Amino acid sequence: MPSPKSPTSPTSPTPSRPHEHAHPHPTPRRRTLLTGALALGALTAVGLPGTAGTAHAAGEPGTSADEPQITDCDTWGARPSKSPIKVLATGPQKIIVHHTGTDNVTDYSQGRSVALARAMQTHQMDTWGWIDTGQNFTISRGAYITEGRHGSLAGLRSGTQMVESAHCTGQNTIAVGIENEGTYLTEEPRGEQYEALVGLCAYICRQYGLRPYQIYGHRDFNSTLCPGDRLYALLPKLRSDVAALIGGDPTAPVWPLLHNGDSGERVRVLQYLLVQRGSTITVDGAFGPGTEAAVTAFQKFVTATVDGWAGNQTWLQLCAPVSRGGAGAAVKAVQNRLTTLGFPADVDGLFGPGTEGQVKAFQTARGLPADGVVDARTWSRLLA
């Protein structure tokens, strides 16, 4: 996971450019992203480069039959990255949906999608100082899909690799980011754009073995309005529509809300997870001032809403998957909670075959896929 040591945003006390791993969508002000020198009206006439290659259609060499048509970086004429793109040897754990915060234009052409891709890259590289476009993919108002950060499409096609991106603090090494052109605070995306999002999410899930409930919105992790109230409200439908294509349960995790004064085993889990992330608090099951301070510090670190309460954003940032071979305080949290719920495991912080067996037994009892991996939904059931 990247280390956003000094994230800033336009709403920070001392704002500067956003950190590469702290990509903000904090307010509708991001609608100014492509104004001035990057005015979209001046860009909409830009078409596909004539000699930079072609977008792959589904079924062509190098693609699978269900891959949507995606215009790659070479084809839309992307600039080279400022420094080498980091290719990770693992696939993502989730998909995060964004909106660009730009105008809801009525130019639905492919040329417009290319203009948008170029403008976003220029702004993020030249104004924000990033090495390349932050997101992995962008869907235009006209439902055209473009590759964002170099290497994203190759990683997706491999099904086993991804590139480190810059679209959501705390998630850039474990999540695919999809930008949707427009601002969806008070209106929904166009039907064609939404259908393109469904198709792209389904393909990403198939390639990486993700489940529909692993589709989130940016505001699930960071303090932001992104992807807008209306698009965010569509996420349950998006998960269901993706599930209709690939199967699986689309039900998203549900998290408890804990705060100063609470006590019990769920607080103990929270404390273990904070210790896993470097906190020095005592794991005693009592949510006192020390735990509140640790929660607040962690929220600042991942640019979540800073309130000292452990809710949706805090849990989703803390609950990284653990599985056989893992070790540490997070494993102790799993073992302790399993034991409390009637699936006894040695609380030694080592995720061995015994712990794996009890995780599978718990998953079976709760109607979850019995894969032995404590992902977000298994975490949420352990906390229920």
Image (cartoon, grey):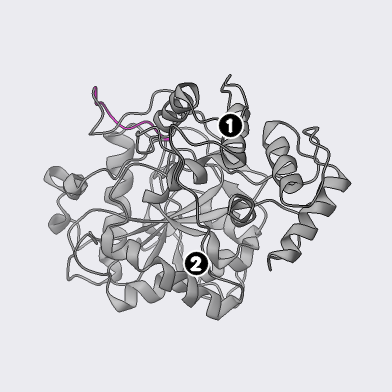
Please provide the residue range marked out in magenta.
14-21
From the viewer's perspective, tell me whether residue 205 is left or right of residue 39.
right
Query: Which image quadrant for residue 324?
Result: top right
As helix, strand or loop, the secondary structure at mark 2 comes to helix
The residue depicted at 62 percent of the width and 50 percent of the height is 379
Q: How far apart in space, not on screen, are marks 2 and 1 (Cα)?
A: 34 Å
Residue 66: image location, x then y, percent: 57, 76
Q: Amino acid at mark 2?
A: Cys
Picture layout, residue 297 above or below residue 39: above
Mark 2, residue position: 201
In the rendered structure, find residue 271 and report the number of the disc placed on it. Answer: 1
The residue depicted at 43 percent of the width and 41 percent of the height is 166
Q: Nearer the viewer, residue 11 or 55?
A: 11
Do labels 2 and 1 touch, CB within 8 Å?
no
Residue 174: image location, x then y, percent: 56, 46
Residue 188 visible, this angle = yes
